[in-house]
Amino acid sequence: MDIHNYMHALGREARAASRLVAAASTDAKNQALLAMAAAIRAQREQLLQANARDLAEARAAGLEAALIDRLTLTDKGIDAMAEGLEQVAALPDPVGEITDVKRRPSGIQVGKMRVPLGVIGIIYEARPNVTADAAALCLKSGNAAILRGGKEALHCNQAIAACVRAGLKAAHLPETAVQVVDTTDRAAVGELITMPQFVDVIVPRGGKGLIERISNDARVPVIKHLDGNCHVYVDSDADPAKVVPIVENAKTQRYGTCNTAESLLVAASVAERFLPDIGRALASHGVEMRACPTALPLLRGAGIDGRLLVEARDADWHEEYLAPIIAVKVVSGLDAAIMHINACSSGHTEAIVTENYSHAMRFLREVDSASVMVNASTRFADGFEYGLGAEIGISTDKIHARGPVGLEGLTSQKWIVFGNGEIRR
């Protein structure tokens, strides 16, 4: 295969389709999304069989546990994909929305209209559900998409892509509005990120190495986050009934996700009270705790298996483990917690457990991350949980889109002017 010619052909088709999708009615887009959801449910067995092939090949290749977890598609996952498509169909269509109209002294009215970005290239590893999520969000926001999934999920991605094409066809929309790259040649990624004549923005979803490479080499804008070193801070005024459930869920509900807590901070005034219970809860899941010199003896005194207790190194405060490992540090209080998070966090998601309103509001204002939470697990930092229907990814950038990127994040605004014959004098 001539990768250059193949990718440029995809780009030309996507650019042509983007103009048709941008002009498509809300009803047509919703019809396509609902038809995709129906096709995914109808093709459940075929999707599971395709995923089983991917999993067998991944295990044979020695893929690590976190990637296997991301790759696995279950009955529940298929239902969630279909439900995500239906939820996006139920969301308001942002395209064409006019806001902030103001009359100027000249007589003209000036406002803004929300418009699609155009063609979105999405590069992702392992997770097959991204194919459906990306198709849904790009279509509803009036964009065309070129999707390049990881080789690990090739069979499942192709099966999901067939459902997406069936939905587009049912709504009389161009099937080229969502194209899945059908080669695993890495040169395809290099082409996709250097085609500004066809692609308007790139969204990478995957490991830090992939995202760094794309960010360095891309010739089109990139919406990204590099990693997810998320923190939970247990404040001096934390409710004892909330502490262990929040920390335990934030760390152990899933290990291989970017919104999993990787660092735990505990105020010194309550460390002796809370750390033993937290430690025992984490130890019950086999979580290794890399603790500071103050936290370590408190955890050792809680009857925890010593093999799960390790003295933390400086590098641990910056680490995204994607594994049953967490860094634990006792801090003097709120000021020290905020300072530590802003210095060590990746800017993804942070949570405080507290009943002190002033502390909660300071944490919300002063912690410089894309999602900041009070008395909730970091695992809620997700487009589905935020009511976006699904998400195209998480952005830790501060320009255009930040946090879970849904429909609005895949659109822009242009200035519009209404006049009645006014001329500038």
Image (cartoon, rainbow, N blue to C red):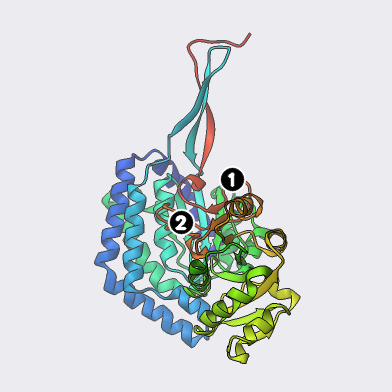
Q: Residue at x 64, y 73 (%)?
A: 271
131 lies left or right of 329:
left
Secondary structure, mark 2, is loop
Give the percent coordinates (x, y) of residue 392. Answer: 48, 56
Give the percent coordinates (x, y) of residue 250. Answer: 52, 69
Task: Give 9 or 98, whichever is nearer the viewer.
Answer: 98
Which residue is situated farthest in the right direction here?
Answer: 314
Tell me if I can see residue 64 in this picture.
no
Q: Amino acid at mark 2?
A: Gly
Q: Earlier in the sequence, mark 2 or mark 1?
A: 2
Give the percent coordinates (x, y) of residue 421. Answer: 50, 10
369 lies left or right of 180:
right
Q: Residue at x 71, y 63 (%)?
A: 340
Q: Is 248 drawn above or below residue 121 in the view shown?
A: below
* Crowd around label 1: few <14 · some 14–19 · many ≥20 (10 Å): few
Give the percent coordinates (x, y) of residue 245. Answer: 48, 71
Tell me if I can see residue 40 in this picture.
yes
Disc 2/disc 1 C-alpha distance (Å):
16 Å
Task: Give 116 or 277, whichever is nearer the viewer.
Answer: 277
Q: Quadrant of the C terminus?
A: top right
Mark 2 lies on residue = 383
Task: Give 273 or 359, whichever is nearer the viewer.
Answer: 273
Secondary structure, mark 1, is loop
Q: Residue at x 32, y 61 (%)?
A: 82
Mark 1 lies on residue = 400
Q: Is 149 drawn above or below residue 18 in the view shown?
A: below
Q: Quadrant of residue 41?
A: bottom left
Task: Give 146 or 58, whichever is nearer the viewer.
Answer: 58
Q: Amino acid at mark 1?
A: His
Q: Residue at x 42, y 62 (%)?
A: 131
